[in-house]
Amino acid sequence: MTDVCGRYAPTPSGRLHLGNARTALLSWLWARSLRGRYVMRVEDLDPGRSRAEHERDQLADLRWLGLDWDEGPDVGGAHGPYRQSERGEHYAAALARLHTFECTCTRRELREATFAPHGREPVYPGTCREGVSHPERPRAIRWHTPPGVMELHDAIQGPQREDVEREAGQFVLRRADGAWAYQLAVVVDDAAMGVTHVLRGADLLHSTARQVLLQRTLGLPTPAHAHVPLVVGPDGEKLGKRHGAPDLTALREGGADPQRVVAALARSVGLVGASVVRVRARALVADFDVTRIPGHDTALESTDVQ
Ligand code: GLU
Ligand code: ZN
């Protein structure tokens, strides 16, 4: 094995759909094709939305697809625990090293005070920077984001630039209800687990600059990034229930052939030709090249997998 380490980091708030399956498969192929380790990390930061049965089904689904992992909540490992709900002390230690401030603004106040670019969270207007506006309320913790433009390279999406302070603002590291923010947890955990290769959905591309800024400020290494396109239905919208697309648990429990599912996922990003109807995940390792994955959304017919 090399020093390369990849990971998949599912949120156990529901079932995995075909888009998640494709992202997981590609992240596994990237790590394995570089002879790296692979870590399964459960991102159960939100206690209200995370369920043990979703974690169980998700891991069973991923094994059914043919993926394996060297470390994870079900197999253990040297960098655990592998559930974010059990890693609070690591996040607290990182938080203590950052220049932060408390914030008592509600979502509604923020919505009213700010203009959110389409599809993004509102940029924090700075209300509590010099002191909280409502001392009686519970307090979130925000980061005094350092100024400057981040330049990043994404193995699929190419060069990226972002002024974090202006475009994401002084973002939350810990919510007022005590839950740790994804942005902080992911940075702390990727470093603690030795992750060198992050492949995930393109919906997280805009989070990367914030994470790299945290890594640099905390003196942590920055992994290589690859953001894979979303899976869309024939109508160009994100593939989902509306398209009659089955989730992975339904496919597994319904007796579907996992090699057909892997083949359909692989065809949709051009890893195999149109004539390949069944393939093992393992068989895709040798030829995998992350730079050949298309950067744009790609369609998948849900009938392809059944
Ligand atoms: N937990 C995130 C999700 O389920 C993925 C985070 C990441 O890969 O950085 O979308
Ligand atoms: Zn505030």
Image: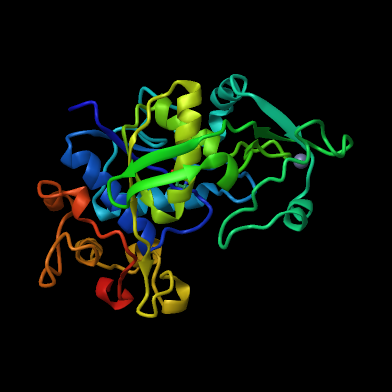
Q: Is residue 130 above or below residue 276?
A: above
Q: Position of residue 21 (x, y in %)?
A: 34, 57
Rendered residue at 16%/41% (across/down): 33
Foreground residue among 189 and 149: 149
- Coordinates of residue 222 in the picture (x, y in percent): 37, 31
Q: Nearer the viewer, residue 230 or 164?
A: 164
> What colour scheme was applied to this rendering of the protein?
rainbow
Q: Is residue 59 left or right of residue 282?
A: right
**On-image quarter of the N terminus:** top left
Residue drawn at (58%, 23%) of the image: 89
State whether residue 129 appears in this view. yes
Q: Residue furthest bottom?
A: 235
What x and y, as percent, mark residue 102? 75, 32
Q: Is residue 217 left or right of residue 20?
A: right
The answer to which image quadrant residue 253 occupies is: bottom left
Q: Residue furthest right?
A: 136
Residue 188 seen by the camera: no
Against 271, residue 179 (above or below) is above
Residue 108 image position (x, y, % from top left): 77, 55
Q: Nearer the viewer, residue 146 or 143?
A: 146
Quadrant, the C terminus:
bottom left
